Image (cartoon, rainbow, N blue to C red):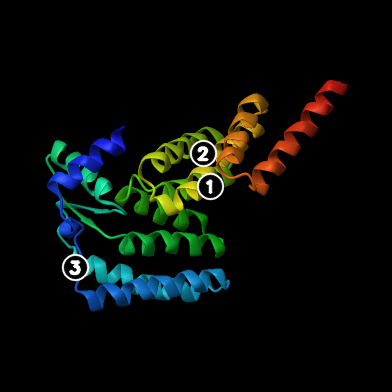
Amino acid sequence: MLRKLLAAAASAFLSTSSIAGEPDAIAQEEQQQVANARQLISDQKPSDAIVLLDKVIVANEARHQDKAQQIYCARSQEEVLLYMLEAAASKRRAVALDPTYCDAIFLKGFALIDLARPAEARANIERAVAMAPRNAYYRGELAETYKNAHDLDEAYSLFERAADDARQFTPADEKTFELTRALRGMGWVRSEQRRFDEAEKLFRECLALKPDDTKAKSELEYIAQQRARQSLN
């Protein structure tokens, strides 16, 4: 319902220029740098990726030096409108950019994970989440850092919010991926807490969305094994 209301409002009050953009040449260059960095991370070259990402981050910091202005990154007009309404409610000036700046910050966090620098990684991912608080992908990765630290309550809370944001704001072509990822995270936490009924429900919700979700299937097999062991005791 919230997404429908925001979509209607966005259509009525916002044009495509509402997501603040840089000149095309600069925007395209930075988008390509981020894409190249993403590939370097995939190629297990996180240090090289950080060099490219830092260039994008520094350039954006130089362009947006007004500390009184809240910077957001958004993937849709509905997301832009929500951020602008929230800023207005808190009486703060704000601008919504396309995702490139935040992607650079987020991917730097991702690269730092590969470099075994978890504190710095989390700080970068938290910064990206603060700038794009309805981005389910960013928040899901932040949840993973808490999961890896075995802070299960915080991890579950973050995964749960990521799932809610995925349902409402994730673009259609990414929705299944981001929603199932969040649901699997929630299910994993509940499984670790041995709350198997809740975990099973979450993993089956994943399969309803993505029938070939091998990770969800594997977790359901694990739950079945644990229940079988419990029945023998």
Q: Nearer the viewer, residue 64 or 117?
A: 64
Query: Which circle's residue, 1 or 3, is located before the other in the chain?
Result: 3
Location of mark 3 (residue): 63
Query: Which circle's residue, 2 or 1, is located before the other in the chain?
Result: 1
Q: Are marks 2 and 1 in contact (CB under 8 Å)?
A: yes
Amino acid at the residue labelled 2: Ala
Q: Where does residue 119 sit, x and y in percent of width and height?
A: 48, 54
Q: Are marks 1 and 3 in contact (CB under 8 Å)?
A: no
Give left or right: position of 106 versus 5.
Answer: right
Gap in Å between the C-alphas at discs 2 and 1?
7 Å
Amino acid at the residue labelled 3: Arg
Q: Nearer the viewer, residue 142 or 42?
A: 42
Amino acid at the residue labelled 1: Glu
Give left or right: position of 124 versus 73.
Answer: right
Considering only vertical position in the picture, is 166 above or below 105?
above
Gap in Å between the C-alphas at discs 2 and 3?
34 Å
Location of mark 2 (residue): 155
Secondary structure, mark 2, is helix
Label of residue 144 in the image: 1
Q: Where does residue 114 sit, x and y in percent of width and height?
A: 56, 63
Give left or right: position of 196 versus 57.
Answer: right
